[in-house]
Image (tube, helix red, strand yellow):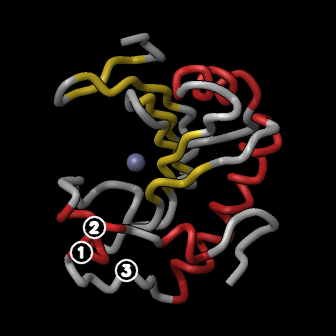
Amino acid sequence: MQLSIHFSLEELIASDKAKSLAINNVPPDFIVERLKTTAAHMEEVRDILRSPVLVSSAYRCLLLNAAVGSKPTSDHPQGYAVDFTSPAFGGPIKVARELVAHLSGWDQIIYEGTWVHISFNPRMRRQVLTKRGDGYLPGLVEK
Ligand SMILES: [Zn+2]
């Protein structure tokens, strides 16, 4: 099922971890609707980067979310968050900088080191963080 021109539902729910643990990571309908909005925002991300976006993890049911060590308050089980890279554009910090400079709105952009976490929770706080150890630093900080 296609959610937007470049993003499918399958891509936004895919998980090797879910497969290996036999977790059914199929979202309820209201989350699918939310993922359409998330996909629309990711089209803007793709337009800004003018490069393909490789999604490593988007929707995670609570069971899968716990299995990957993420907090239950994460935006992933809500269908708002996407972890991704865009190797054709550049490394994750370059991607994060470009989005902070040009994206019309977001809730959180987190430079995670090897990927970018972006969330479109309707709070849309335009928060920018760098993951460091168990915590976060404000802004985009090179490792
Ligand atoms: Zn994430």
For ligand 1, tell me if the residue under mark 2 lies within 8 Å. no
Residue 133: x, y in percent?
19, 25
Against 131, residue 37 (above or below) is below
Snapshot quadrant of residue 62: bottom left
The answer to which of 33 and 84 lies nearer the viewer is 84
Q: What residue does disc 2 label?
A: 17
The amino acid type, in three-letter code, at marker 2 is: Lys
For ligand 1, tell me if the residue under mark 3 lies within 8 Å. no
Give me the residue at 76% from left, 28% from top: 102
10 Å crowding of disc 1: few (<14), some (14-19), many (20+): few
10 Å crowding of disc 2: few (<14), some (14-19), many (20+): few
Snapshot quadrant of residue 105: top right
Snapshot quadrant of residue 88: top right
Q: Marks 1 and 2, how far apart in space?
A: 5 Å
The answer to which of 34 and 143 lies nearer the viewer is 143
**Marker count (numbered):** 3
Please give left or right for residue 114 compared with residue 38 in the image: left
Against 82, residue 35 (above or below) is below
Q: Give the quadrant of the C terminus.
A: top left
Q: What residue does disc 1 label?
A: 20
Mark 3 or mark 1, whichever is nearer to me = 1
Using the image, tell me which numbered label, if any, was put on residue 48. Answer: none
Give me the residue at 26% from left, 70% from top: 64
Tell me which label, 3 or 2, sits earlier in the chain: 2
Is the residue under label 2 in contact with that under label 1 (CB below 8 Å)?
A: yes
Q: What residue does disc 3 label?
A: 25
The amino acid type, in three-letter code, at marker 3 is: Asn
